[in-house]
Each structure stands twice: as structure tokens, then as C-alpha cells.
Image (tube, rainbow, N blue to C red):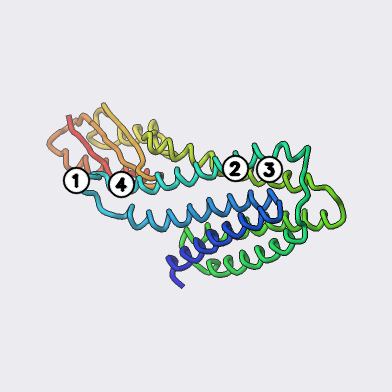
Amino acid sequence: MSSSKNTFIAFLLNLSFSIIEFIFGWLFGSSAILADAVHDLGDALAIGSSAIMQTYANKPADRVYPFGYKRWNILAALLTSSILIIGSSLILVENIPNLFHPNPVNQDGMLVLGIIAIIINLLASRIVKNGHSHNESILSLHFLEDILGWLAVILVSIILQFTDWYFLDPLLSLGIAIFILAKALPKAWNSVKILLETSPQGVNLEELKEILLALENVHEITQLNVWTMDGYDHCATVTVKLTNPAVADKTKANIRNSLITFGIVQSTIEIL
């Protein structure tokens, strides 16, 4: 199957199963299942928005968006991260008191749902396992990650078969919520930095400036601004003074080639 079909299947599985988790998490009284429902809902939104926005983001630049539409990917990522942060924060607020006053849960239902969840995630992992795209490799790791989470749910349900340690359910939900926050907060902050047009990660401006100054015919760099559109494709404006303005075109080409090695695909070079 094509990469787009695999992505669509992953989206449907995550969205459908997150709805099932919300329903049965509420019926079984399990905050751990509800926490994982938030996790899967966030993943579904991330996968779905990525697939939709990827097509939209590849549209060429026009008079309305002179730099193109790549920032829509960042907007989708920020929205997904915000939903995950809000959802996991609510789980933390709700379940910290439950650690000290835990409510009984339906451990039998948790066990059955956990087994079904692992089977579904194994099947989904096999679907995308043979894919060759970057997106499919991420999805494969995601499904394996979900399997580990559901193994923890099954372990808790088995322990509750023989004990009344109901605090394990809110404890697991807190662990899942903290895990979600640990992933969502850095992604949200990275998206905010991109929208604020900070210097892109992996681009050392001092090193870049030294490389440009070392080029033949470059006398001085008076301005060097670098920002990123989506975390991958970078842009730059460069203002330079030349030793010999007569060969400005050749020098511009050399500057552009040096910028490309830093992932800067769009550049404006001004000669003083």
C-alpha cells in the first residue's frame, strides 16, 4: 500500500480507538484508559493534520503567501500540542486527589480492552512496518510505543484481580499524562519559536558568517538574517560588501551554494 493509504489507516485507527477508549474508560471507571484516550486522540490529530497540511503546505508561493504555505504545518503542530497539553493537564488535576482516595475500577474490562488494543496496534504496526517513508517509520514507532502503554494497563488490571490497590489506576494515568507533557511541551515551544522566526536549530550563525567571509571577493558581511519556514526549509537575507563588484554574479552564486549546505533554500543577497 502507498504511504498516503498507510497514513490514512493510522489516522482512522487512532481516531476510532480513542473514541472507544473514552467510552470504555468512563464505563470502567479507569482514568488510565481515559489518559491513553487523550494520547491517541492527540496522535490522531497529529497524523490527520500532517496528511492534510502536507498537501496544502506544498502549494507554491503566491501574492497572498509570498514565502509559500509551509507555516500551515507549524500551525497544525501547535494546535495538536495545545490539545495534548490541555488534556494531560486536566488528567493531572483530576487524578492527583484520586491517588489518596482511589475509586474501584472494572479490572476485567481493562484486561479485555488492553488485549484488544495490543492486537490492533500490532496489526497497525505491521501495516506501516514495510513502508519506506519517514512518516511511516514514525508511525511504526508510535504503535510500538502504544503497545508498551497497554502492557502497563494489562499489568495493572492483573494486579487488581488479586488486590484492591486501586491507586495504581490513577498512578498510571499520571504517568501517561506526564509522558504526554514531556513530548508535547517541547514540540509546542519549538513551534512557537518557528512562528516567532528565531534562528533555526542546527544553524550556527557565527560559523555561517565565517564561511561566507572566507569566500573569494567577500569583503564584509553587514547583515545576516536566517529563519525557518517549517523547521526544515530555511530562509536568509544577506547584505555584503565586495572587493570587486565587477564579478558580483559569481560571488552571489558562491554565497547561495554555501547557504544551501546549511539547509537555506531561499535567500536574498544584496550587494553594497
Where is residue 13, by image quadrant? bottom right
Please tell me whether mark 1 or mark 2 is closer to you in this view: 2
Gap between marks 3 and 4, in whole Å? 43 Å
Determine whether label 3 and label 4 are within 8 Å by CB: no
**Amino acid of disc 2:** Ser
Residue in view at x 51 percent, y 56 percent: 44
Mark 2 = which residue? 88
In terms of secondary structure, where does tag 4 sit?
A: strand
Task: Please tell me which of labels 1 and 2 falls first in the chain.
Answer: 1
The percent coordinates of residue 3 (x first, y second) are: 44, 66
Gap between marks 3 and 2, in whole Å? 8 Å
The percent coordinates of residue 207 (x first, y second) are: 39, 34
Determine whether label 1 and label 2 are within 8 Å by CB: no
Gap between marks 1 and 2, in whole Å? 40 Å
Task: Please tell me which of labels 1 and 4 falls first in the chain.
Answer: 1
Q: In which quarter of the image is the C terminus?
A: top left
